[in-house]
């Protein structure tokens, strides 16, 4: 994410705000690598927002150039369906159960048209980690809607909504979790059992942040940058996010 080849990928639009938010931590602790800082921040945020404790191990080095940055087109596209999800995640070693568990991360945050192209929150309390995403996916009626930018998503048209209230939304890939029989069984189980979801999410997320990492019997990372070797911390980046400006804060969705 430090290089334009990856950080500038349209599929990563908006992540510059998260990166800039962590720059004061990097400034205070320059010894830590960005790869450790960003993954650690992710597991800490999940825990602090009420989610499970995710197993995390340090030791990732920062690369000295972009020669190992993966090609674009390998990230999930929310406008697609079940086959696309499997194409993306099976390549990384995730099965249907793990794909659905990771999708539960949509309990947090929201979409922005100036970033992903979609708009709105998935749940009515997007700063609390829970299994509400799965409950709402099954319980509410999701209606297709085309946005002004041409993107299509699903929204819940709340009959009790007041003027100015923001609609809850789901991506096409989210709705695919409900319509695909293999995915749906896990949506139903996670909607009914928060503890099961938390357990499965923690394991899948820990697996995600270890992708590509090779460790020895003592958990020391064997990967190097092929130039300097060892634990190399990249120089600090700017505190100012690059990319489109933030939009005015939207009204909170009601349910």
Image (cartoon, helix red, strand yellow):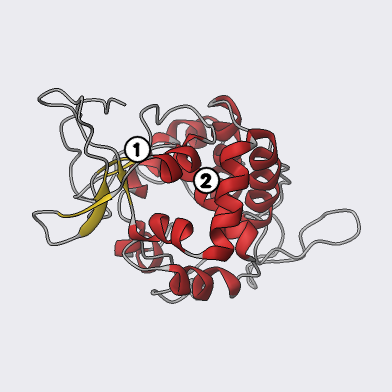
- For label 2, the residue is 104
Mark 2 neighbour density, 10 Å: few (under 14) some (14–19) many (20 or more): many
* Rendering coords of residue 170 (x, y %): 33, 49
Q: Is residue 196 left or right of residue 87?
A: right
State the SS at label 2.
helix
Q: Quadrant of the N terminus?
A: bottom left
Q: Which residue is found at the position 33% from the left and 65% from the top? A: 9
User: Which of the numbered marks, if any, corresponds to residue 134?
Assistant: none
* Rendering coords of residue 71 (x, y %): 44, 77
Q: CA distance from mark 1 to mark 2?
A: 30 Å
Q: Quadrant of the C terminus?
A: top left
User: In front: 59, or 9?
Assistant: 9
Q: Residue furthest right?
A: 217
Q: Is residue 151 left or right of residue 233?
A: left
Q: Is residue 15 left or right of residue 214?
A: left
Residue 121 in view in this figure: yes
Whether residue 88 is situated above or below residue 157 in the rendered picture: below
User: In front: 83, or 54?
Assistant: 83
User: Which of the numbered marks, if any, corresponds to residue 239?
Assistant: 1
Q: Nearer the viewer, mark 1 or mark 2?
A: 2
* Rendering coords of residue 103 (x, y %): 50, 51
Q: Which residue is found at the position 51% from the left and 37% from the top? A: 26
Quarter holding residue 156: top left
Residue 234 in view in this figure: no
Mark 1 neighbour density, 10 Å: few (under 14) some (14–19) many (20 or more): some
User: In front: 221, or 179?
Assistant: 179
Q: Which residue is found at the position 63% from the left and 71% from the top? A: 227
Tell me, yes or no, whether the two marked residues, 1 and 2, touch with CB atoms within 8 Å.
no
Count of numbered circles in the view = 2
* Rendering coords of residue 21 (x, y %): 39, 35
State the SS at label 1.
loop
């Amino acid at each position: 994410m430090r290089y334009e080849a990856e950080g500038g990928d349209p599929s990563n639009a908006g992540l510059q705000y998260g990166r800039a938010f962590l720059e004061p931590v990097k400034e205070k602790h320059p010894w830590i690598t960005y790869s450790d800082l960003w993954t650690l921040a992710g597991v800490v945020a999940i825990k602090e927002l009420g989610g499970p404790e995710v197993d995390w191990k340090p030791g990732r080095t920062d690369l000295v150039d972009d020669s190992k940055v993966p090609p674009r087109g390998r990230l999930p596209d929310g406008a697609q369906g079940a086959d696309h999800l499997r194409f993306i995640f099976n390549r990384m070693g995730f099965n249907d159960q793990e794909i659905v568990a990771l999708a539960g991360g949509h309990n947090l945050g929201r979409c922005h048209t100036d970033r992903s192209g979609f708009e709105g929150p998935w749940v009515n309390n997007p700063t609390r980690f829970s299994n509400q995403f799965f409950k709402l996916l099954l319980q509410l009626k999701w209606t297709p809607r085309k946005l002004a930018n041409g993107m299509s998503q699903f929204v819940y048209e709340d009959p009790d909504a007041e003027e100015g209230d923001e609609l809850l939304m789901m991506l096409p890939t989210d709705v695919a979790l409900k319509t695909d029989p293999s995915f749906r069984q896990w949506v139903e189980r996670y909607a009914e059992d928060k503890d099961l979801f938390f357990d499965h999410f923690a394991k899948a997320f820990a697996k995600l942040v270890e992708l590509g990492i090779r460790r020895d019997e003592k958990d020391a990372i064997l990967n190097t940058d092929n130039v300097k070797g060892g634990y190399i911390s990249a120089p600090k980046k700017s505190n100012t996010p690059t990319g489109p400006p933030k939009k005015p804060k939207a009204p909170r969705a009601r349910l």
